[in-house]
Image (tube, rainbow, N blue to C red):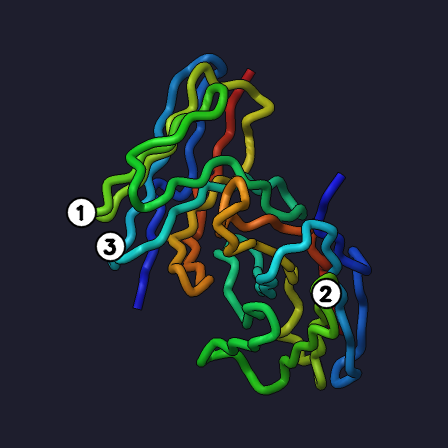
Amino acid sequence: KQEVTQIPAALSVPEGENLVLNCSFTDSAIYNLQWFRQDPGKGLTSLLLIQSSQREQTSGRLNASLDKSSGRSTLYIAASQPGDSATYLCAANTNAGKSTFGDGTTLTVKP
Amino acid sequence: DAMVIQNPRYQVTQFGKPVTLSCSQTLNHNVMYWYQQKSSQAPKLLFHYYDKDFNNEADTPDNFQSRRPNTSFCFLDIRSPGLGDAAMYLCATSSTYLGDRAPNEQFFGPGTRLTVL
């Protein structure tokens, strides 16, 4: 059974700092890994999707990496802004459409 | 804009009174999912439809049922809500067709917050 862990559970940084969020998964037989952002009381917004054959994806200030062999993914946020404050979730997906989510990391960026 | 829509956004029901949550999508995706998310927890997959094929998670209670009458719509029925069923219910879609820009990328609706009195 796939298990996904995100550490730390919460992170507080000053504005402008670069930061890394971590996601680890126990079963390396994933089809892809997806990073999401969730604002309080809202749905999930897709940030980046990395296919199992890829090692990284970039979108603006965000860069996600994937190392299947070690069961790890990271989300790098450059030059953080107060608007980046949210909960970030990763999901490990199988090709049969099954997703396993981590509990998320709640990020606070202080002005 | 193509999107995933959930109605209602907030639903209040009484203990034991059946309730139906709805999800529609304009993305023409072949896979639709229902998740339950409790406060500060990971979304938990309840079931998903791969085209017309229904896939139930082993630990999803029998109290939860789903219907997908066509590609665009999917419903979550809670037959006898208990206090423990109060949660955010999230609908998501994805496409497995290789021609799509991002096959298997999940797109979520805004969620329905269910309160059980």
Mark 1: secondary structure:
loop
Tell me whether circle 2 and circle 3 mark residues in contact (CB < 8 Å): no
List the residue tagged with mark 2.
Answer: B114
Side of A109 relative to B111 (left or right): left
Q: Quadrant of residue B31?
A: bottom right
- What's the residue at 46%, 79% (across, down)? B59
Mark 3: secondary structure:
loop
In x, y percent, where is residue A29?
26, 57
Q: Quick check: B75 above or below A12?
A: below
The amino acid pointed to by label 3 is Ser
The amino acid pointed to by label 2 is Leu
Mark 2: secondary structure:
strand
List the residue tagged with mark 1.
Answer: A69
The amino acid pointed to by label 1 is Ser
- Whether callout 1 and callout 2 share a subunit is answered no
Q: CA distance from mark 3 to mark 1?
A: 6 Å
Q: Quadrant of the N terminus of chain A?
A: bottom left
Q: CA distance from mark 2 to mark 3?
A: 35 Å
- What's the residue at 56%, 76% (across, down)? B53
User: Disc 1 is attached to a residue of which chain?
Assistant: A
Tell me whether circle 3 and circle 1 mark residues in contact (CB < 8 Å): yes
In x, y percent, where is residue B104?
49, 52
Q: CA distance from mark 1 to mark 2?
A: 40 Å
Q: Nearer the viewer, residue B54 or B64?
A: B54
- What's the residue at 33%, 32% (across, down)? A56
In x, y percent, where is residue A92?
38, 53
Q: Nearer the viewer, residue A98 or B95?
A: B95
- What's the residue at 74%, 51% (across, down)? B26
Q: Which label belongs to residue B113?
A: none
In x, y percent, where is residue A12?
44, 28
Side of A14 relative to B75 (left or right): left
Q: Quadrant of residue A21?
A: top left
